[in-house]
Amino acid sequence: MTDHAHSHDSGCSEYQDLSRRQFLATSATLSAAAVVYPDWLPRVTLANHYSATRDVMVSVFMRGGVDGLAMVIPHTEARYYSLRPTIRTPAPDSLAANRAIALDNRFAFPPAMQGLLPAYRAGDLLVMHAVGQKTNNSRSHFDAQRYMEVGKPVDPDLTTGWLGRHLASVPPVHPSPVLRGIGLASGLAKTLVGGPQTLPIADPANYGIGGSSSTRAARMNMLRSNYEGSVNPLRAAALDAVGTIDLLSRLNIGAYAPANGAVYPNSSFGRGLRSIAALIKSDIGIEAASIDIGGWDTHASQDPNGGQMATAMQGFAQALGAFWADVMDTGYPVSTVAVSEFGRNAGENGSAGTDHGRGTVMFAMGRGIAGGRVFTAGWPGLEVAQLEDRRDLRVTLDYRDVLAEIVQRRLENTNIGYVFPGWTPTFHGVTR
């Protein structure tokens, strides 16, 4: 597709089409038993013990291609300001009311991102820049998201996700878990496909079967008895769903009270993170969760200080900041990562927006994350000769390096070649 200015209400046509289809073709609700693994994937032998010491993994996908240069500003580079005459955030040392908030002597948050400052200042938020997929330069939302979620670019044979394969290659944290992985969506995100006892549940607080409450128990018993004699994977998937309905109805997530004064925004992302927090604290054996947040396909009228981009950043930062205060700052072992399929052009377009680019930002958060800093694997710079194709921030840090280190050191999974096939990661000290 050709990138050009689009209405800020709709984003590009490819992204709108992708959103409408809801990944139905590639995010089927599958149990691990239903997934066919390619022959070249290494075989994994599970340990015969349970592990209750590893972190819960929460994967946030910022769908639409995040403008990393708006979200984390290289405030000392004059080139940033000349590339973006109308969509820039004033430098931290300016007198403007909407001036940026310095994170260090190179990078800053715009005011819309201040909801994440407490986590950053506590040393629990690691900000990473010039991040992306080194071995894939697709500017198609669909292709770039798929490659990122399966953890291996340009391989049509790999249908499982990196987080699903993580779950499939470690023993559960509880001896008899009902639900190990959850995707906060109507269809299971590709990231989680292949995970055992993993379900898509758009709203865990209201998960169940319709109909009269007076006959609910009888209908649940009928479903259970009907599928008991079925063959796998149908039996396992059906009984997982029935067991999960029972479990979630007992938890009463709707009455969950966040700790530490945390206030989640009343948005789908905020409500989803609140539900994830409730599930983690209920100690039912949840090991992985995935959740999306959109609003990042900012081809026109972007405005990081008061427009579409500001609204998206504020919702993102406030919700994740509440999740940190509620869950991580109260001591729960959780690692959260937030990624996007690609960044945007370094310079603004003729519609005061940005088109599809390459390098962007990534976030990792948790007590086990070596945060309180902005990390780059070599800042590529914004001068014309430093940009990829003379228009994009270069990718110097592959997102799989970050995820692989967290998977091995925080999730206690040494099967890195299985989780990220074909990739030999470099660890950069993103964990404590």
Image (cartoon, helix red, strand yellow):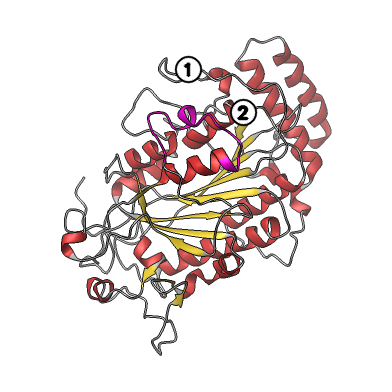
Q: Which residue is mark 2?
A: 170
Question: Does the segment drawn in magenta span residue 275?
Answer: no
Q: Is residue 254 above or below residue 304?
A: above
Seen at 58% across and 69% down, the residue is: 121
Residue 165 on image: x %, y %? 52, 29
User: Local crowd at mark 2 within 10 Å, few (<14), some, or many (≥20)?
Assistant: many
Left or right of 237 in this view: 249: right
Q: CA distance from mark 1 to mark 2?
A: 18 Å
Seen at 21% across and 56% down, the residue is: 4
Residue 247 on image: x %, y %? 77, 35
Q: Quadrant of residue 172?
A: top right
Q: Quadrant of residue 23?
A: top left
Looking at the rendered structure, the secondary structure element under dot 1 is: loop
Give, as a three-letter code, the residue at label 1: Val
Q: Nearer the viewer, mark 1 or mark 2?
A: 2
Left or right of 3 in this view: 224: right
Q: Which residue is mark 1?
A: 36
Residue 404 visible to an observer of this rendering:
yes
Task: Report the magenta residues as a range.
Answer: 409-425
User: Local crowd at mark 1 within 10 Å, few (<14), some, or many (≥20)?
Assistant: few
Q: Residue furthest bottom?
A: 95
Give, as a three-letter code, the residue at label 2: Val
**Front-lying residue, 375 or 188:** 375
